[in-house]
């Protein structure tokens, strides 16, 4: 017997999509890094190293589960029974309440093929407008801003290697040392060569601790900070006037707006000392190459789109986008956070990043799908707006790749709305907190068990390759969608083979902003990934955008004047602290996967809150004691972690356990519909 050949594939978790090898056919599955993959170069974080354990995990769901009525326990059944129940519920609901009463909720962890197929399933099999996905909680503000400013939304418009070559980088609300550890090799390479990095974060994170300059603003005040930095850049003559004149439009209105952002005023709003602001501007403005990167800390606010626009304004005024080793980028989050937002699982979108309300886009995609454009529904509600009205508008919900019971804002309310549904269907490999509430749970294949493509945070389209078959009786999401479409009388429109679906996606995306027409599985294999847009098979793909022009009609980037606005909730007598939320190193998202990995749980066993020592003293709590956090929406209990690394007016909780989102505010950004996960008012009390 020869040694089994490892299959090269990619990590199931974050958008860095580290190259991983899985020994083909083996159970239990064995994983090794893919040493020469060009982005991670063999590096993996602890989550990635342990990812294979979930393939053979004892809690994995291996058969469909159903319950006979709401209070009955879930019990195993056959696929026929499970699918028939779903179709009966769909038919009944659509007959009584109309097509939009059946909704879909997708995820940025789905491969391109699955995200595309889920969008098509909603529009063609269900003919429903009700579909959105968890990326609305993740990337939407940066996406909205990038579309407005650059005319295209590819999170990182350059390859990750450029990070090592930039002289100065400002990271705003981004903590890659914990959220994408192997990417730090590119930052570290830059630092070793003398690059200076500026981190903007209310916490002194591991990323900030290794930087040259840490600005520690009050949560939700980044827009004022960006305007203040631009104010200083104007005053100190650091604006690249030639770039502004030749490559952009609209600067004068921004120049006028930022005039009012005096350093003293900005210090009062943000808490960032003026001297630190001056140093940051000087570093950025005098560097021969510089980048501004934002992530969820800047974006998950009710003014997230404007906040991103403020940092884009700064980057444009300094002449960065499109210049060598320079630019503005947003660091995408989920495994397929980039591709998952391009191919039609968004409420207002058709594949290729086309608009659902654009007649030409509807005609093009309908022709690829073989349906009449008039049959396609119009745009639906955004993620939280749909969840908020479950049981009222949407009566039957299919969830594929999200654990909304834990990760949606104001989760107690969302839990009640889930309970008000007539019928909930969840496809997952574990009984997540959301799946545990379902009427039907469908067991699905995991990353190493299926083929498909994902688009990493650079816009590089990669192949997930099947190393092993799913366990007996477990189906892929594509097989599930096809079988449901079949039973709904629309099966002829749906393939369940990833390659066939990808070839259809290529045609559907052709000519759109996210054009995959020239990308094939063979090219991805040969070239270690292909950067979109790639309109033809003889097109090289596009590692760097904006070198000549922006994706706007006239080729110029757009400035947008934006004004500071307080977060919806600010501290008061009853709720005296600011609450912000985010991630810890060991866990992933709602924790549905990583809370099932013993090695990760041994390091990070339960929900905690970071408190400054002054807060701990005031509340009377010592390290590891339990405290109760309360907001206008709910309460939850956390273990106290006392640290000097956080502002004394702010507390931080990771959202990997049930509880954090009982607290958060679902106030939405008016344009992106992104909830305000990162700023609300909270009280802290000890538990006796
Ligand atoms: N370990 C781990 N890694 C992950 C994930 C995970 O769950 N766990 N999830 C992946 C996904 S989907 C995503 S979206 C990315 C997210 O990656 P990041 O954006 O790096 O993660 P967060 O922890 O949400 O937020 C980053 C930082 O924002 C800071 N912050 C909070 N409020 C504010 C504010 O008002 N202003 C500023 N400037 N900063 C603020 C927080 O203190 C935090 O350190 O991570 C990906 N990688
Ligand atoms: N308070 C607070 N809340 C937040 C955030 C925050 O910073 N603070 N961040 C937000 C962000 S950025 C994000 S991205 C969301 C993420 O939050 P969620 O959408 O809940 O993300 P996951 O926990 O990854 O949930 C994915 C679920 O689908 C399953 N799954 C994974 N892959 C697949 C697949 O291919 N098919 C199927 N059928 N199932 C699959 C997993 O087992 C898991 O149960 O949370 C948001 N919520
Ligand atoms: S950094 Fe992201 S992609 Fe890489 S191993 Fe960790 S979770 Fe997986
Ligand atoms: Mo995310």
Image (cartoon, helix red, strand yellow):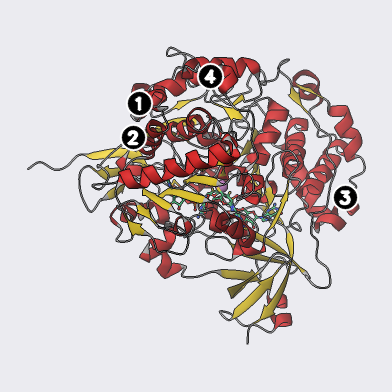
Q: Nearer the viewer, mark 4 or mark 2?
A: 4
Going 43% across and 40% down the picture, which residue do you hit? 87
Q: Nearer the viewer, mark 3 or mark 1?
A: 1
For marks 3 and 2 on the same chain, the one whose residue lies earlier in the sequence: 3
Label 2 to label 1: alpha-carbon separation:
8 Å
Label 4 to label 2: alpha-carbon separation:
24 Å
Question: Residue at label 3?
Answer: 263
Please provide percent x and percent y for residue 474.
29, 46
Label 4 to label 1: alpha-carbon separation:
18 Å
Question: Residue at label 1?
Answer: 499
For marks 3 and 4 on the same chain, the one whose residue lies earlier in the sequence: 3
Q: Nearer the viewer, residue 561 or 182?
A: 561
For marks 4 and 2 on the same chain, the one whose residue lies earlier in the sequence: 4
Q: Nearer the viewer, residue 537 or 404?
A: 404
Distance from mark 1 CB to nearest ligand 2 atom below 8 Å: no
User: What secondary structure is found at the residue carrying circle 1?
Assistant: helix
Distance from mark 2 CB to nearest ligand 2 atom below 8 Å: no
User: What secondary structure is found at the residue carrying circle 3?
Assistant: helix
Question: Residue at label 2?
Answer: 451
Residue 494 vs residue 386: left or right? left
Going 51% across and 48% down the picture, which residue do you hit? 184
Q: Which quadrant is the N terminus positioned in?
A: top left
User: What secondary structure is found at the residue carrying circle 2?
Assistant: loop
The reply to whether discs 4 and 2 touch (Cβ–Cβ < 8 Å) is: no
The mark found on residue 365 in the picture is 4
């Amino acid at each position: 017997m020869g040694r089994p050949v490892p299959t090269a594939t990619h990590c199931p978790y974050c958008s860095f999509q580290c190259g991983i090898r899985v020994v083909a056919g083996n159970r239990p599955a064995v994983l090794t890094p893919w040493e020469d993959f060009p982005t991670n170069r063999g590096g993996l974080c602890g989550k990635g190293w342990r990812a294979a354990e979930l393939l053979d995990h004892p809690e994995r769901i291996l058969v469909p589960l159903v319950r006979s009525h709401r209070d009955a326990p879930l019990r195993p059944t056959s696929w026929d029974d499970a699918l028939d129940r779903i179709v009966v519920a769909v038919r009944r609901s659509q007959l009584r309440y109309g097509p939009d009463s059946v909704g879909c909720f997708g995820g940025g962890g789905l491969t391109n093929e699955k995200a595309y197929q889920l969008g098509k399933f909603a529009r063609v099999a269900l003919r429903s407008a009700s579909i959105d996905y968890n990326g609305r909680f993740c990337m939407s503000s940066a996406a909205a801003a990038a579309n407005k400013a650059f005319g295209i939304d590819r999170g990182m418009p350059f390859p990750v290697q450029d990070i090592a070559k930039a002289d100065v980088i400002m990271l705003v609300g981004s903590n890659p040392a914990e959220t994408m550890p192997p990417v730090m090799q590119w930052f570290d390479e830059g630092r070793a060569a003398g690059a200076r990095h500026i981190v903007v974060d209310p916490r002194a994170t591991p990323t900030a601790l290794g930087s040259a300059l840490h600005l520690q603003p009050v949560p939700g005040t980044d827009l004022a900070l960006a305007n203040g930095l631009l104010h200083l850049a104007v005053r100190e003559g650091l604006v690249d006037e030639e770039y502004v004149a030749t490559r952009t439009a609209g600067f004068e209105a921004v120049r006028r707006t930022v005039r009012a952002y005096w350093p003293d005023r900005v210090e009062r709003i943000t808490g960032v000392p003026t001297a630190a602001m001056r140093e940051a501007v000087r570093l950025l403005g005098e560097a021969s190459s510089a980048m501004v990167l934002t992530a969820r800390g800047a974006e998950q606010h009710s003014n997230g789109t404007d906040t991103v626009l403020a940092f884009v304004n700064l980057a444009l005024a300094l002449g960065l986008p499109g210049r060598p080793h320079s630019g503005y980028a947003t660091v995408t989050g989920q495994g397929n956070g980039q591709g998952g937002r391009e191919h039609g699982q968004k409420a207002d979108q058709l594949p290729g990043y086309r608009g659902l309300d654009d007649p030409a886009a509807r005609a093009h995609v309908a022709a690829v799908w073989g349906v009449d454009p008039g049959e396609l529904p119009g745009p639906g509600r955004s993620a939280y707006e749909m969840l908020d009205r479950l049981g009222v508008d949407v009566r039957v919900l299919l969830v594929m790749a999200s654990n909304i019971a834990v990760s949606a804002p104001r989760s107690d309310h969302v839990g009640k709305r889930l309970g008000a549904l007539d019928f909930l269907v969840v496809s997952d490999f574990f009984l997540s907190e959301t799946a545990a509430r379902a009427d039907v749970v469908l067991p699905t294949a995991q990353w190493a068990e299926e083929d498909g493509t994902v688009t990493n945070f650079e816009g590089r389209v990669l192949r997930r390759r099947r190393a092993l078959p799913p366990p007996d009786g477990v189906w892929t999401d594509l097989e599930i969608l096809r079988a449901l479409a079949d039973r709904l009388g629309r099966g002829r429109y749906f393939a369940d083979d990833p390659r066939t679906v990808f070839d259809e996606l290529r045609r559907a995306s052709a000519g759109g902003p996210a054009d995959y027409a020239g990308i094939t599985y063979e090219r991805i294999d040969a070239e270690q990934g292909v950067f979109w847009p790639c309109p033809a098979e003889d097109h090289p793909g596009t590692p760097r955008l904006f070198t000549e022009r922006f994706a706007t009609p006239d080729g110029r980037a757009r400035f947008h004047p934006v004004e500071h606005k307080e977060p919806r909730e600010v501290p008061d007598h009853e709720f005296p602290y600011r609450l912000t939320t985010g991630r810890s190193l060991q866990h992933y998202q709602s924790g549905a996967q990583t809370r099932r990995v013993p090695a990760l749980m041994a390091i990070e066993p339960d929900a905690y809150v970071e408190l400054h020592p002054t807060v701990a003293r005031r509340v009377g709590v010592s390290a590891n004691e339990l405290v109760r956090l309360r907001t206008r929406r709910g309460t939850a209990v956390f273990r106290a972690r006392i640290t000097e690394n956080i502002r004394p007016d702010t507390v931080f909780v990771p959202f990997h356990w049930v509880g954090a989102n009982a607290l958060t505010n679902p106030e939405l950004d008016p344009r992106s519909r992104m909830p305000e996960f990162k700023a609300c008012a909270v009280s802290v009390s000890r538990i006796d």
